[in-house]
Amino acid sequence: MILFVPSAKTTNFPLFLLALFVGGIGQTLLQTSINPYITILGPEESAARRICMMGISNKLAYALGPIVLSIFMSLQNINVYDVIEPFYIISAIFLAGAGISFFAPLPEIQAQSSQKNKENEIDTNRTSIFQFPHLFMGMGAIFLYIGVETLSLGTVLDFATRLDFAPFNVFGINLLAPEIFVSYATFSMIIGYLAGIVLIPRFISQQTALKYSSVFGLIITSMVLVLPVKWSVFMVAALGMANAVMWPAIWPLSLAGLGKFTKTGSSILVLGIVGGAIIPLIFGWMVDSISYQLAYWICLPGYLYILFFAIKGHKQNT
């Protein structure tokens, strides 16, 4: 993050791109290490619940980020030099976090094979990561999940901007302002995370939660497509509730039974994040070809595949 400071001071765009590249590498490494660690840090059946707790922190930070940045800069009139002080602070926070992680007594743990696999001695006979087809199906689920989540969070503002809502003020806040729809999408995900924390695994399994979430995603997407356009945008924001438990559930289901291959499997799952770059491009082409509202049909095959993964694709002998 510290590379953003000299890129701003010198207004050097290639250096800015390098800072983004290095930051992306760091986030990839964090995803590769944190998600499997949280998955196997406790009972396998409650892994989704623990990742939901992480998700709440993630989405609160997503919502609070613009508020914090507004302390240092005007978001309507941004000057490149205004980012220098915030990135000094962000770099210091990351440095402190690295120090805490380095000195924290975190145990080195490895995923355990499921009881069924132990009895059949499946894992001990596998010598390659390619002998776990459910892992690669999980990568496909991550690819599509990240794509549809990016559409929900990343397009709702642009969609609302095109609709020209009349102001609807409550306590001086325009609840129909385009930028407020980003908060709607974020908080709908937080509601989904809270539901996952309460329900998993006490009332439903993480596999069942993923199945219900996929069906919920199909229903909401259908409503996006058929409702009047000014109601449709609210359904786009509501997709957050369907998406919330997907990441927490896909990870433990995909890593189940990998044993010594858990770290490699985690790296493969992270590759699926590229869906957040590819699917929005297809969505943008569809917006230009048909309409903004109807372009969301791209979510339907994504949710259908995730439903397949929840029902059958996650099984370790698939």
Image: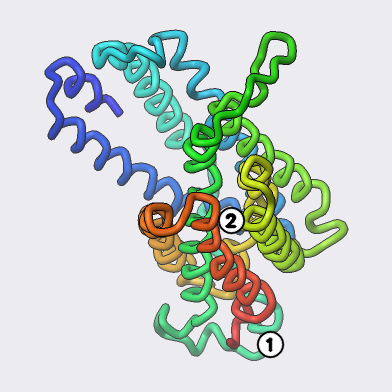
Q: Quadrant of the N terminus?
A: top left
Tell me which residue sits at (86%, 57%) in the image: 202
Dot 1, how many residues are within 10 Å of its Cα: few (below 14), some (14-19), or many (20+)?
few
Mark 1, secondary structure of its residue: helix
Q: Which residue sits furthest right?
A: 203
Relative to 313, residue 145 above or below = above
Q: Which residue, given by chain and number where applicable, does mark 2 sit on?
A: 247
Amino acid found under the numbered disc labelled 1: Glu
Answer with mark 2 or mark 1, whichever residue precedes in sequence. 1
Q: Which residue, given by chain and number where applicable, does mark 1 sit on?
A: 119
Where residue 40 sits: x, y (%)?
A: 61, 58
Q: Which of 21 and 97 is in front in this view?
A: 21
Where residue 264 sits: x, y (%)?
A: 41, 67
Q: Which of 167 and 18 is in front in this view?
A: 167
Tell me which residue sits at (50%, 82%) in the image: 133
Mark 2, secondary structure of its residue: helix
Q: Is residue 91 visible in the rendered structure shown here?
A: yes
Amino acid found under the numbered disc labelled 2: Trp
Where residue 200 sits: x, y (%)?
A: 78, 55
Q: Which of 215 and 247 is in front in this view?
A: 215
